[in-house]
Amino acid sequence: MGIVIDRYEDFDVEIANKTIGHHFDSEIAEVKITGLGEGVGLMSSIARGHLTLSSGEHKKVVVKCTARTENSELSKGLNFYKNEVNFYLHLAKDCPIEVPKCLYASVDPITQDFLLVLDDLGNETAGDQLVGISEGHLRAAFIRAGQLHGLYWGRTSEFDWLNYQLDMRTTLFRRDQILRPGIDPSLKNFSQHFTGNREEIVRKIGDQYADLFLQAMSGEQTIIHGDYRVDNSFLVERNGSPDIISVDWQNTTGGNGTHDIAYFSAQSCDAEIRGDTELNCLREYHQTLIDMGVKDYSFDQCLEHYRYNLLILMITPIAICGTLDQGNERGAQVGATGLKRTFEAIESLDCAQLLK
C-alpha cells in the first residue's frame, strides 16, 4: 500500500517529496497547504498545496483526502474513495473527457483513507452549481459523456476493481441511509420547493426507489462518472467551441450511461434549457453512442432510461438538504438549487407518470 493521510495538513515536505517529488526537476523545499473555498469538498477534504522547489520555482497542486465530517462514513459506505483512486490509476489516461493530470493516488483497501494529488486547474473557469450551465456547455457535456459511455459500452467486465450501480446492498443503503431519512428534514427546511404534488412525488420515489433504480440502471452497462454536474466541471473552450474538464470521479462505477447526463441536467440546468434544448442534447448524446459503435439501442430506450434516472436522482438534493452535513451556507444553497432543478426536470418530461 502507498502513502495515505488523515488530514490535508499532514501533506508536508517529507510526504510531498515521497509521493510527487519525482515529477519535478528539483527537491520540494517547502509546502504550504490552504483549504479550498466555501462549499467545496462535501464528501472529501480538498486543499491547494503551494510548493516551493529548491530551485526557487513555485508549483501548485490539489490535495484530496478523507472528509473530516460525518459524510466520510457515507463516502466509505459507497466506496467513493476507492472508486476515484482506481479511476485515476486505470482509466484517466484513456478518458475522452479531459481530466486533471494525476500526480499521486493511493487508498488503504481496509480503512479507505486515501491521498490523491492532482494538477491544479486554478487558471481554468470552474463551473458553479448556483450559476448553472449554458446551452453550449450542456451540449459539450452530453457529447463528452456519450464518448465515455460509447468507449466502455459492454466492456465493464475488463475491470475487476469496478463497482456497479446495480448492487442491491448499495441500493438499499442509498434508500435507507440517505434518501428516506432526508425526506422529512427537507420538507421541513425547504418547504417552499414542495408546491403542488411534489411531496407526494418524493415520498413515492422513496417508497419505490429500489424498483426505480433497477429500471434506471437496466440495459447494457458502461463506465459512468456518477457525479457528473457543473460543480465538478471546469468550463473551457477547445478549438473555439465549449468543452469541459471533469473532476471528482468518486462515483466511477458500472451503470447505465444516461445516469450521467440526467444528473448533469437535473443538477445544472435552469428552466429555460428544458424542453427542446434538453431533448436536442439528448439526441446528440444518443447519436454519439451510435457513432462510437453502439448497436441495438434506440432513442426511445435512451429517453426512457433518462426519465427513470431523473426520478432516482431526487436522492441528491434530498441528501444535501436533509441527510448530509451541508458544511456551510453555500452547501445549503446547492441543495436548494438542486431540489428546484430536479423537480423542474421531472415535470418537464412528465417523469412522475412512471411512478406506480
Image: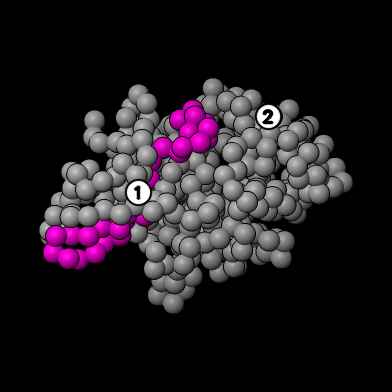
- Residue 122 spot, x, y in % from top left: 39, 64
Q: Which residue is painted at 46% across and 67% down in the image?
A: 125
Compared across the picture, whether 245 is left or right of 227 comes to left
The span shown in magenta is 48-77
Q: Is residue 210 magenta?
A: no
Res 181 label = 2
Residue 280 is at least partly visible in this image: no
- Residue 334 spot, x, y in % from top left: 62, 52
Q: Quadrant of the C terminus?
A: top right
Q: Viewer-proximal residue, 58 or 173?
A: 58
Comparing marks 1 and 2, which lies closer to the viewer? Answer: 1
Q: Is residue 232 above or below residue 105?
A: below
Distance from disc 1 to disc 2, alpha carbons, whole Å, reads 32 Å
Compared across the picture, whether 4 is left or right of 298 comes to left
Answer whether labels 1 and 2 touch (C-beta < 8 Å): no
Q: Which residue is painted at 26% across and 46% down in the image?
A: 12
Residue 115 is at least partly visible in this image: yes
Q: Is residue 330 above or below residue 240?
A: above
Residue highlighted by disc 1: 63
**Within-10-Å neighbours for mark 2: few <14, some 14–19, many 20+:** some
Q: Viewer-proximal residue, 268 or 242?
A: 268
